[in-house]
Image (spheres, coloured by chain):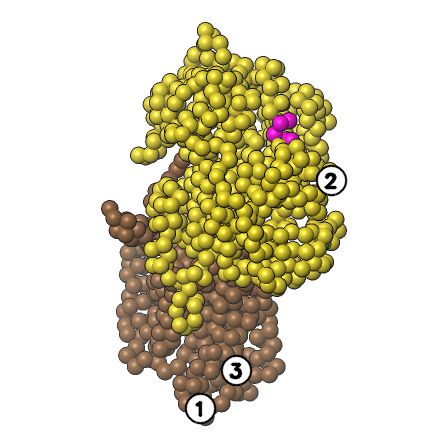
Amino acid sequence: MSSLGWRQFVKFRLLLTEAILALMAVGVGILMGGVLVWIVGEDPVKAILIIFEGAFGTAYDLGMVLYFATILIATGLSVAIPSQTGNFNIGAEGQTLMGALAAGVVGAYGPANLPHGTCLTLAILAALLASGLWGAIAAAIRSYRGGHEVIASIMLNFIAAGVSGWLVVTYFQAPDSQNPETITVPEVFQLHRFDSFDGAPATMAIFIALAFAFCFWLVLERMRPGFVMKAVKQSPEAAIVAGYSPNKAMFWSFTIGSAMCGLAGAVMVLGESWRFRLEISDGFGFLGIPVALLGRSRPLGVVLSAFLFASLHHGSSLLDIESTKIGRDLAQVIEAIVVLSVVSMVPLLRFMTGKFSTRDR
Amino acid sequence: MNEQNPPLIEFRSVRKLFGSFVANDELNLKIHQGEIHAIIGENGAGKTTAMKLLFGLEEPTSGQILYKGEPRPWFGPRDAASAGIGMVHQHFMLSGFHTALENVILGREHASLNREGPLKRKFLSGFLQIDRVKIRDELDRVACKVGFNIPWDCSVENLPVGLQQQLEIVKLLYSGVDVMIFDEPTAVLTPQETSHFLQMLKDLKNDGKTIVIITHKLQEVKEVADVVTVLHHGKSVVTRPAKELSIQAMADLMVGRPVKLGELPRLPQKVSENLIEITDLTVVSPGRPNLLSNLNLTVSAGQIVGIAGVEGSGQMELWSFICGPKDYLNKKKLLSGSFKLFGKEALGLRRSDVREISVGIAPRDRLKEAVLIESSLIENDILGHDHEFACGAFPSNQWLDRGKARKQILSRLDGFHIVPCDPDARIDALSGGNQQKFVMSRELTRKPKLFLCAEPTRGVDVGSIELIHGEILKRRDSGSGMLLISSQIEELMALSDKIYVLFSGRIAAVIDRHNFTEGLIGHAMGGGNS
């Protein structure tokens, strides 16, 4: 085979193998979820059909899936981007919270006399900035102090919960509410919902999320910073000799990754609830981790797995209504099993792809 | 040695395939009791695979391996050890966190408990105290016999490589093996340590041990080996008593064609502008003696400047200073001195700046510092040179032109005879020698004005050494200046126009080419002034 053909063949085989393994992980998750359903005494096929119907049954459901997918693409990217330099961002929850707060505050108190597009841009940029800055704390601890990013970012989750609560109650409390929340943002700061989804909060933000994923792909595959990130991940020593700065690369990949959470926060506030509430992020930050893991931290992978998890998440809510024995917890169990399958498939992947890339001597 | 006795170990027409790749073929080998048997061959000639077969780490595809006339009775390293065969690997199998003593005990805890009753041993082995005092006594006795003095309580990461190797050897001796296999034992040793080591091999032989040494340093083979087996492309080409083969003959057999050894032709040096000018450089580090003190050094165009010195004399400090002077300003390690690159003040340059002004860098640790081991050749060709392939308007010059890289790489791979010549092969599919040739091709074919190069031929076979040395001299002749750091005096003497000998951070001697002698350099390396 010509060298060009061979190259594409190898690359294609590699991608195909990864895709097959991801699908296998999902299959294992669904299968084992089904076994659990059967043990509980419910019909597994029926349960799956219910989830399917819950996710795609009506236009409203489709809209909800789109909404959740938007959020999960963002939080998934916030995990996938830092992992390009070998860092694990487990602080998406806190970063999302800070982004949501920033969007809520700018929306509530920002200049409402500007055009709609400008207002939205302002609010979203503020959210990206807030999330990025929050992530930058963990990034700095990692890059310039040598602390562990997992510890740093998970602690910052707790701090974010506390700080945002205090900020809301002290400075931004809505006077008409008993709960700690901000006032409703004016319409000029609200993301318009698409008409065709019966009022579900599906907005053009999905295109922003997809654009971010595309930019991530561009940087990774076509640009110099992406090359530097790969070098840093594989060998910091070699990166240093090559004239790159591993600390800088780690800092910026972590910070920019965290900033992605700002989009998730902004979508929650400007697209759905129109105000910042304390419990707004509701575990979607953490859900970004399985999204990135299943998507193997690749741009397209993250997008696809975000849609899968969004469908599962929304579809399973119908179980609460349709079944007495099982509920939406099933979705979480399946998610967890999928993650475990992905993690345990790494050696399998190395075995399957190793044949095409290395020669054993 | 004595043909009438049956061999201790025998390979009969052994063939080993990995997929379609032939690692060994028609391999015949007879190792007799009490001899020093050298196995030589280029990288990728199948030496390591042969030893894996002997150990039972791999099974031969066809053919037989006999031990004392019987088919090999063991199935792995542990079995092999109890059968009396042990190996010192090229990369030491030591745990850096543990002390020397603990490294000997590691994995042998059970053996040290043998005096306990069987029941107790079976059920309480995890709880019983290991008798360190007794083990240490025994170890001291073993070490004393071969003339080693190992600080048993020092953690291994703080031991110099020479001592680490001694530790590996004592480990083997302590486990009571009779056949000792050494894989590239002198790759990391200084000349003095090497001659010690070779003497020790002879002593071990006199004690009745059988020794197999895998190497491509032919001088050493000539010095200690009784019998030589040459491998070429996985086949045993010839087995002969060492005294019947000249070094030239061994080299030719290894490479499979006549090789030129020794002095390569070079043009007379022209006097031209200085590329590196270091004056009165002093670098400090808190809590340690000066890393570099009052160092003066110049490298001019068309000149190879060698840096000699025992390990830790300041070579690597000098190296990383030149690679990235700004780091030293930032970390406040620079006490005084000036540094000019290409005639311009260079103290403020970052590592990336140095890279971009036509300085080629080939670092010492190939696997760790020079390549991305999980990436393809083409990615590795871009590594450190991405500024050459920069393109795009927005954001300006942040895009990478991989197509351009692809166009350039083939001529590079071709020119250095790198196998496989495939830009998409992962670099770990290349043998060590080919990887090193790749690193050299990446830096040298870009025609750097200045080339910084450390250990250019570490772990590389004769054929590749010839090529690498030839290319280095070619660059010199066409006007590049070079700084060459090497632990091998012969290499420095073969290539350099001028040698600076470092001793504890200062320059102990500057020697011009016409004055080179091993004695003079060795004397200065030990701290003597000249």
Q: Name the chain under label 2.
A: B
Quadrant of the image occupied by residue B497 = top right
Q: Helix, strand or loop at disc 1?
A: loop
Which residue in the protein does label 2 denote?
A: B529
Determine the residue positioned at 56% across, 22% down. B223
Colour assigned to chain B in the rendering is yellow
Q: Residue A256's spot in the image, x, y percent?
A: 49, 68
In-front residue for pair B153/B231: B231
Distance between the Cα atoms at labels 2 and 3? 74 Å
| Residue type indicated by callout 2 | Asn
| Residue type indicated by callout 1 | Leu
Q: Residue A98's spot in the image, x, y percent?
A: 53, 73
- Which segment is the magenta one? B192-196
Colour assigned to chain A in the rendering is brown
Q: Which mark is residue A114?
A: 1
Which residue in the protein does label 3 denote?
A: A105
Q: Residue B343's spot in the image, x, y percent?
A: 59, 61
